[in-house]
Amino acid sequence: MRLRANDWISVYALATPYKKAVFSIKGLINNSRMDELPEGSGRYYGSYYIKSDDEIKDRKVKVKISGGKVKGTKQLYSDGSITINSDIELVTVSTDTAVLKNGIRGGYMMFPPMGVRMMSDGKIGSMYRIKLSDCDSAWIHESKISVASKNVRPPDTETGVIKLSKTDNGSMARISMYDRVPYVAVEGEKSLTVKLYYTRFHSNWVIYDSSDTFTKNVNFRQAGTNVAEINFEFNKNIWGYDIYYSTRNALIVEFKEPPSISRKWPKPLKGLNIVIDPGHSAKREPPYDGAIGPMGVFEYEANLWLSEVLKKDFEKLGANITMTRIGDEDVPLRERPKIAKKAKGDIFISVHYNAIGDGKDPFARPRGYSLYYYHRHSAEFARSVHESYIKNIKLPDEGVRYGDYHVIRMTYMPAILLESAYMIYPEQEEMSCSPSFREKLSRTIVKGALDFFDVPKKPKWKKKSGKKKKRRGKKR
């Protein structure tokens, strides 16, 4: 561990119950009491609050256990050591798969792109603590960063001109900045707020595009000593967004507006670009990619079978379809959202079948279908397709769920991930192989999409009568 003033050191030991336990750290604390919680459990806990003048280097923790019928004392030293100082290390994100977490084993906070610079004020094991601001901190794995040499300028920037411009499918904001800093985006009702760390707000100009009818307003504030917030307001609900750094000292924020489609039969989805993602890739040797059913059906196969039917059904309604894979090619997870954006997709559907983790009881509760979304702009799409599942698929309903999956987190449009059945149950695995079940699933998903786009019901065409009308002649 590398810690600093105002941090806590927590010590845990497992030993014989009902003993006396103390811990020591040379140069810091000696024989500090550890409490057995709960009593009789043999689990002993102690802690120490680091003061401003504490400073040690590479010191181990010593725990002593004594008392009871056995005379003498047992003691053990930690494998790892503790360093306490006030050093700040500068780190740079070195991969495009980095994740900042809210704790060492916590949830995801943000996904900084390659080249973003940050300050680290602590380290526990392989996790670096990132000091984002006076109030915010995060954690990142050491494999995702490079540590800068000493005497390097710390991350620090200010915003310049904010320029808006119309695009083919929405609008775009270009925010002038001279350093790559971490950011987080929060989607609201007809709005998007971008929070920038290590940043001072100094935008004297906001330039609007008169042809941009999607963006309504831009406002901003200094939210903290080194935290700036920019809030974008829109005339409609946002359909999706993408944020990235350009090569010319700017942060680019792209906003996607709702697509314009026909909504008229027989081609109500004309003008709609749909990306279908058959989940996983072909790997028939360990480590497998996806589930395998009791009869030996690979999930990647079943996903493709359903996706092919879904493609044909959507095309009949006039939609343009892009598949992230069309066969047994290996498509990395991170490439699938990129394919979707390059295709200018308007909606994204990731097709999967479910499995159960080792050690779980498969009969603990009914299991069937579930649907996942990540972004706010994807929630209504997920609910609409879910309603169609309830009406048409006679399997247990496991509901709509928020899911932190890469393919629906990184997509630039409403995106859902479908788990239509469980590969682990022989009867459901057999259903995934059934052409009639796949056709029913496809019709169900399509119906959910039609409802999402508020497409009117297909009109019933009246059959022409075969009877001929008698011609009445004039009486002579």
Image (tube, helix red, strand yellow):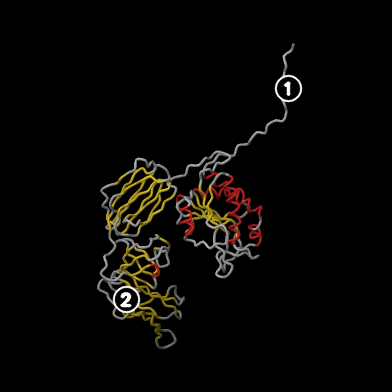
**How crowded is the residue under tag 1: few (<14 C-alpha within 10 Å), some, or many (20+)?**
few
Q: Residue at x 44, y 50 (%)?
A: 240
Residue nearer the viewer, 476 or 34:
476
Q: Can the viewer see residue 437 in this picture? A: yes
* Quarter of the image that includes the N terminus: bottom left
Mark positioned earlier in the residue sequence (2 or 1): 2
In x, y percent, where is residue 47? 35, 73
Residue nearer the viewer, 402 or 195:
195
| View extreme (bottom): residue | 71
Residue nearer the viewer, 26 or 139:
139
Give the structural element (helix, strand or loop) at label 1. Answer: loop
Q: Which mark is residue 209?
A: none
Judged by depth in the image, the label closer to the viewer, 2 or 1, is 1
Inspect the image, locate mark 1, and give the three-letter code of the amino acid beneath it.
Lys
Position of residue 356 in the picture relative to residue 373 (left or right): right
Q: Residue at x 42, y 81 (%)?
A: 19
Q: Which mark is residue 83?
A: 2
Q: Is residue 92 above or below residue 72?
A: above
In x, y percent, where is residue 24? 34, 80
Q: Which residue is tagged 1?
A: 470
Total marks placed: 2
**How crowded is the residue under tag 2: few (<14 C-alpha within 10 Å), some, or many (20+)?**
some
Give the structural element (helix, strand or loop) at label 2. Answer: strand
Q: Can the viewer see residue 378 in this picture? A: no
Circle 2/circle 1 CB separation < 8 Å: no
- Snapshot quadrant of residue 468: top right
| View extreme (right): residue | 476
In x, y percent, where is residue 53? 25, 73
Inspect the image, locate mark 2, and give the three-letter code of the amino acid beneath it.
Thr
In x, y percent, where is residue 340? 48, 54
Q: Is residue 163 above or below residue 39?
A: above
